[in-house]
Amino acid sequence: MTIRLRCFSIAATAGFALVTLAILQPTAIWAQPVDPLQAPEAVDPSPAPDAVVPALPVPPVVDGAEPKTSVATMPRTPGSSPYKGPESVADLAEKLLDAVVNISTSQNVDMPGRGVPKLEAPEGSPLQDFFDDLLKKEDGVGERRLQSLGSGFVVDSSGIVITNNHVIADADKITVNFPDGTQLEAELLGTDPKTDLAVLKVEPEAPLAAVQFGDSENLRIGDWVLAIGNPFGLGGSVSVGIVSARGRNINAGPYDNFIQTDAAINRGNSGGPLFDMHGYVVGINTAIISPTGGSIGIGFSIPSKLAVNVIDQLREFGETRRGWLGIRLQAVTDDIAKGLGIGKARGAVVMGIVPGGPSDKGLLKVGDVIVSFDGREIATSRDLPRVVAETPVGKTVPVEILRKGAAADPAQPMSVEVTLGRLEDGEKLMEKAGDSTGSSTKPRGEKNSKMASVKTLGMTLSDLDGPLREQYSLSDDAEGVVITAVNPNSGAAEKGIEAGATIREVAQEEVSSAKEVESKIAKLKEDGRKNALLLLASANGDLRFVVVPID
């Protein structure tokens, strides 16, 4: 299945963004009666008078000041969470509807044509717009205007509007449509495709109704939430559900940490807010899983915890400025954790240091397992990039690592301090390094090496020499022992090991000859070990740990 992040399309496929997982394919709008929400009596979920959602402009940011995009927190009283569903959300929805908007975009697309005379309708005729869409240029190329509708919400009464990047992507014109019928053309302040967020600016004649972000970290699975948006072009639609799950990864981007909800989200809801029962925005509706194109109760929202930092940067700089550690990572599996001797699988293992990056000072080494960053626990390798990206550029942070030989017990962490760089600069640095030091273009000839071969673990190994470097396009500074053949029925083949890779370490000990690899494997077998932890390098130098069973 695939997931398609789509806003409602008026014409063709404008503004659609595609991610994997489920298909949204409705081609018509339909209405179907459903039973009203039945729920036992419960406490009134609407906020108290002093907790009314404010609609005030956010003060400008100065050094050391609070974030530009304010975040409201609502303390939770122990035992106060009702187990009954909300009797009604009418009062709450009434306070929020005016701050939720529709986003319409248009895009001019050149289309091939044979050229026709200009079509003109009588003066004042509504058909003129239709004829203009069909207008053909003299050079035989026609123009067609594609339009789409999505959702958004106001976070600053001066005119700051938040939506999804895929709602406004490639648009020539962006219009914000308010519930009272007002239409304002929007300026695009900035976008972030990695989190699918966009910030717009309109110029209203009077202050706008606005909502505040809440703290998505306070959400619990089972909490009630409310979604407002523009499904299928039907503006101002309200739906209610619960938080079904947190921390979902749907492979939409590098920082996936979605809130899953069963509140009805459909095409056109993209960019709309997900509210808690106090009226604070805790998520931005972005994607659904659906085999039919309609809501089946599995929707995903960007958590406010992730969104606020990105939005602040887009408002202030027009671009993101994320922290960067300058390392390459690999997930820590149970087998790798056992091979590293760190106990249970946790953290992220360092597999490479980017030359010239923040960590290229001997502080971190290949094989280190990062278990904490700036005081925040790193449970998996997926957590670290997000936590680092949320940390300010230039900040010096403590990083707790597990390193073999650093202590009597390798499962006991040690701490180093790293000053973060900027991710966007790091990406340019890595791209430049890739262009200048990319993999060799030498042909893989059939020259024979005179080095003796060793067979172990289903692999044929040889010491590195000139002919093998040329045959497998290995750089002059490549180290280790080269793999020249892999038995297709071996455990090594099942782990994806191929000829041309080099073995750098066996059980975290460096090797420089095929005989040395054979000796260390024999020692592991003698010690009763069932698996061998190998550090492999590909032809372009990328490292990874592989656990191979010892026959």
Image (cartoon, grey):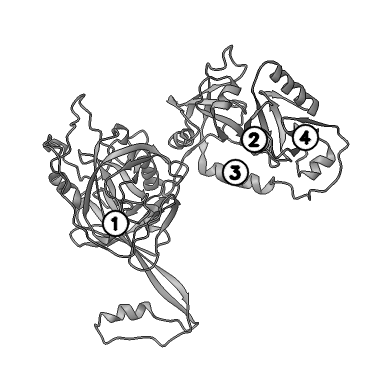
Disc assigned to residue 495: none
Q: Nearer the viewer, mark 3 or mark 4?
A: 4
Amino acid at dot 3? Leu
Mark 2, secondary structure of its residue = strand
Label 1 sits on residue: 202
Disc assigned to residue 460: 4
Labels 4 and 1: the sequence-earlier one: 1
Amino acid at dot 2? Leu
With 500 as the anchor, is 285 left or right in this view?
left
Amino acid at dot 1? Val
Please name the residue shown 31% across and 57% down the image.
268
The percent position of residue 16, horizontal first and vertical second, equals: 40, 59
Label 2 sits on residue: 543
Amino acid at dot 4? Thr
Cα distance, mark 3 to mark 2?
19 Å
Labels 3 and 2: the sequence-earlier one: 3
Cα distance, mark 1 to mark 3?
36 Å
Q: Residues within 10 Å of mark 3 (few under 14, many from 20)?
A: some
**Residue 92 is at least partly visible in this image:** yes
Mark 3, secondary structure of its residue = helix
Please name the residue shown 33% across and 86% down the image.
120
| Residue 536 vertical position relative to residue 133 in the rendered view, above or below | above
Q: Residues within 10 Å of mark 4 (few under 14, many from 20)?
A: some
Mark 4, secondary structure of its residue = strand
Query: Do the residues under discs 3 and 2 have CB atoms within 8 angstroms?
Result: no
Q: Residues within 10 Å of mark 2 (few under 14, many from 20)?
A: many
Label 3 sits on residue: 429
- Residue situated in front as seen by the camera: 184 or 129: 129
Mark 1, secondary structure of its residue = loop
